[in-house]
Amino acid sequence: MATRLLKIGSALRIYTNKTSLVKIPKQWQSTAASLKETLINQPATRVTTLDSGMRVASEDSGAATATVGLWIDSGSRYETDDNNGVAHFMEHMAFKGTAKRSQTDLELEIENMGAHLNAYTSREQTVFYAKCLSQDVPKAIEILSDIIKNSKLGENEIERERGVILREMQEVETNLQEVVFDHLHAAAYQGTSLGRTILGPTKNIKSISRDDLQHYVKTHYGPSRFVLAGAGGVDHNQLIELANKHFGQMAGPDYDAIPEYVKACRYTGSEIRVRDDTIPLAHVAFAVEGAGWAEADNIPLMVANTLIGAWDRSQGGGVNNASNLAKTCAEDGLCHSYQSFNTCYKDTGLWGIYFVCDPMQCDDMISNIQHEWMKLCTSVTEKEVARAKNILKTNMFLQLDGTTAICEDIGRQILCYNRRIPLHELEMRIDSVTAQTIQNVGMKYIFDQCPVIAAVGPVENLPDYNYIRGAMYWLRV
């Protein structure tokens, strides 16, 4: 009987090796190869540097629509205590009329084209962009150049926008996630320009004048800091001609004086706690210093960030979540939600986690986060890393859906890397990350490093900073 069972067992093994029980269609078997081919065959990103120092970068996909925009290497990081908030104020003023177009004319012209005009300010960049039909690209760029160079900055409009920005600040103060991240930057980069908010303090908004706005434009805007980016139905040679036509004359005496600048920052492990027991839930951000955009460690830190993941109690998943921390949160009800983040700047970054929990769960949540961080540094497995790499690649490629997302990717990467990283190169760099790579960056950036903490709400249960700092390493025998 035993001999017969052995024979049956060996026959089954031979059969299983020859014949898969799950039949995979042929078109699915070549998915990996087709992904590589797809990434390699993406339209090339062409980059040209003009005599003025301005860079033109575009990806022509032949689409019927296009997104074109001006990415400016200037944001709140390059302000001072006295003019903090002026970059954001200028972004608001850009659409309030120019020397040859009133605000109404500008709005009607954009609407008649069926286009969309928008702008935003970050700590390191100011962006103005337009979405339009590909045939309207020349008109869109002419409008963008007009609002950049010839904004009227009327006193009545300035006063009106002053009130709009003050109301915007009140709205931001009700968004506790925004409040916590502003506190996180203030603690992490205290005494440096990265510690200031993008909107600026109330007293500055009330005092910023027309002269302040004009001086800011003359000293911070100029071709050497401009990237004209385009995606969709755009012609690169046409963009070069339009850039020379509309921005070439900015290389006058005022703009020639724009200096190359790198504002140094200084990271400080510290904390800010704003205890308010009238708020129902605690909002906490917990981070360490990460890598800058161009540093080689940035990709492994992105994978490590994906390993920690995100979770919300309104989601399904339960114990089937990919992230260990998400499983623990689902099983033990540690928090209402959490999300890991990897915020990058030119020369530094913040790598960490933001969570919302009940008042008396801060201690347990922090403890579990640190436990997962220590596992990243010491015992992460290849299986976990492989899954995180697939999730990261999927998320990155999904984010490049549409001309606006691609245009934004081009503009940001030209400012950060002075080139656009091809998708197949990005995939190869992600694929090269191993469990050992994660452990190495974990030991460099997380293990025994001073964290920064920002907490708002009923945070009585949040452990003392020195206790948290003491749990940033493991002693194992």
Image: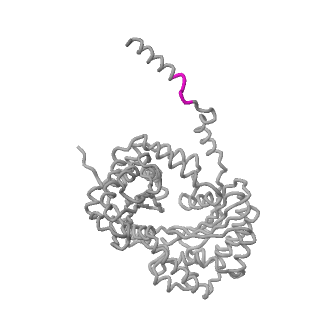
Q: Residue at x 70, y 61 (%)?
A: 66
Quarter where residue 4 is shown: top left
Q: Position of residue 458 (x, y in %)?
A: 33, 69
What is the residue that sits farthest to the left in this orientation? 477
Q: Residue at x 45, y 58 (%)?
A: 342
Q: Position of residue 463 (x, y in %)?
A: 28, 63
Q: Position of residue 98 (x, y in %)?
A: 68, 80
Instruction: Report the quarter where the N terminus lies.
Output: top left
Q: How many marks?
A: 0
Q: Is residue 65 above or below residue 384?
A: below
Quarter where residue 55 is shown: bottom right
Q: Can residue 224 be seen from the camera position used here?
A: no
Instruction: Report the quarter where the C terminus lies.
Output: top left
Give yes or no for residue 299 being in the magenta stretch: no
* Image: magenta residue range: 17-22
Left or right placement of residue 384 versus residue 167 in this view: left
Q: Is residue 468 above or below residue 147?
A: above
Q: Is residue 88 above or below residue 405?
A: below
Tell me which colouring the rendered structure shows.
Answer: one colour
Give yes or no for residue 19 being in the magenta stretch: yes
Left or right placement of residue 213 versus residue 339 in this view: right
